[in-house]
Amino acid sequence: MIDINPDRLLTHLRALANFGADDHGVNRVAFTEADVRARRWVSERFEEAGLRASIDGVGNVYGRNRTSDRAILLGSHTDSVPNGGWLDGALGVIYGLEIAFALRDRPVERSVGIDVIDFQDEEGTVSPCLGSRSFCGELSDASAIAMVPSQSKINRTSGAPLIHHYERGRHLAYLEAHIEQGPKLEAAECTVGIVRGITGIRRFYAQAFGQADHAGTTPMDMRRDAARALFDLVDHVYREFPRIGGRDTVWNIGNFSIRPGAANVVPQHAEMLIECRDLDEAVLENLERSLHARVQTHNASEAVKIEIERTVRISTVPMSQGIVALFEGAAHRLGQKSLPLASGAGHDAMIVAKVMPAGMMFIPSIGGRSHSNAEDSKEADIISGCRVFASAVDRLMSESG
């Protein structure tokens, strides 16, 4: 059993929150001074926990087990969105750190150890999941290094590793802990969320082409109103998507713009962004078909034409069923109520899952708040979550040996 130290866990979390501290949250955007100082601090703590730590050319902080040739990789990220929260990403890194300390304090002969990683730029300040994509080989070393802002003081010393890379023979699995960033766990009074997968994303750009006329003198039945055409499409989204989608389906009208944008001018041009997310690729396909069918029907009968194009397609990423079962078993052993969830937000785990078995575990977010300085979780949930996470890691290490 891995016996965590709750006081040390919370102390390290609060210490990390001092880097970029900003009105109860953190402003620790990737490659800024606060981000670089935080990564150096993480590297020092990895060393204290008995890991061999180094920072690579994009800022990934890698703590490598000194005695094992095979390891379970634990981690997340410590960069934040502008004016973000103190736990987003940081929780997973510090959980990994605490487990490393716990294993150092009570060493047990094992053939499988743990490595811990703090990935760079998960939030996408320069490029989303830059650190995990470079680690997993989606980006060449040269391409990844070229993205680092020239003014950044990220590690550029001679002898520093160019990029840390996934090692097929070493890294057996990846486990990531995170705050939920939503309200479901709190509403269900559950301590642990077990992530079944990370949702796919479809994003669309729609525009309509009308004719500008005087709004006071043009009869309603003689107008070519571009805004009205897109309002019709918005109405379709909110009427039909609930019928097509399921429990985990979400959608959003992220932007809507009308030109010329005057109260006394009939809109000549309108545009909007539509995004939908779901864990089921078939549902996403049906949502997309529904949009295109509605546009075709509209264009066949109306003078104002709509054009729509898909601008983003990100496939769903299922988590390892074996790791899902490990988290479920750990929660059960420790008497913690758990809830299966789909992650509606992207995480480094969706990148790492392409090269090794990966799994994620959530703890509740108070009020579902995240990406703001209102982000917080109860201390009891942070501690309970770490115990469940450590128990799952312990079982995986034993089974892998």
Image: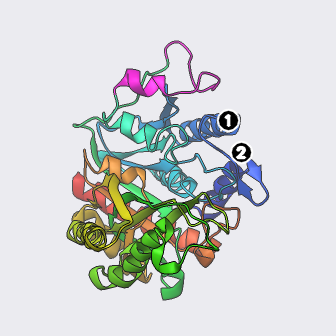
Pointer 1 residue: 37
- Residue at 49%, 19% in the rendered image: 160
Q: Decide: is 214 above or below 166.
A: below
Residue 228 percent across, percent down from the top left: 47, 73
Magenta-highlighted stretch: main secondary structure?
loop
Q: Nearer the viewer, residue 214 or 313?
A: 214
Specify whether residue 237 is in view: yes
Q: Which residues are magenta?
A: 140-159
Q: Quadrant of residue 23?
A: bottom right
The three-letter code of the residue at mark 2 reads: Phe
Pointer 2 residue: 19
Q: Secondary structure at mark 2?
A: loop
- Residue at 47%, 39% in the rendered image: 127
Q: Nearer the viewer, residue 323 or 394?
A: 323
* Residue 376 horizontal side relative to residue 318, left or right: right
Verify CB contact (< 8 Å) between mark 1 and mark 2: yes
Look at the image and say whether residue 237 sits in the magenta stretch.
Answer: no
Residue 190 percent across, percent down from the top left: 48, 83
- Residue at 60%, 57% in the rendered image: 260
In this rendering, the count of numbered labels is 2
Q: Nearer the viewer, residue 56 or 98?
A: 56
- Residue at 29%, 51% in the rendered image: 353
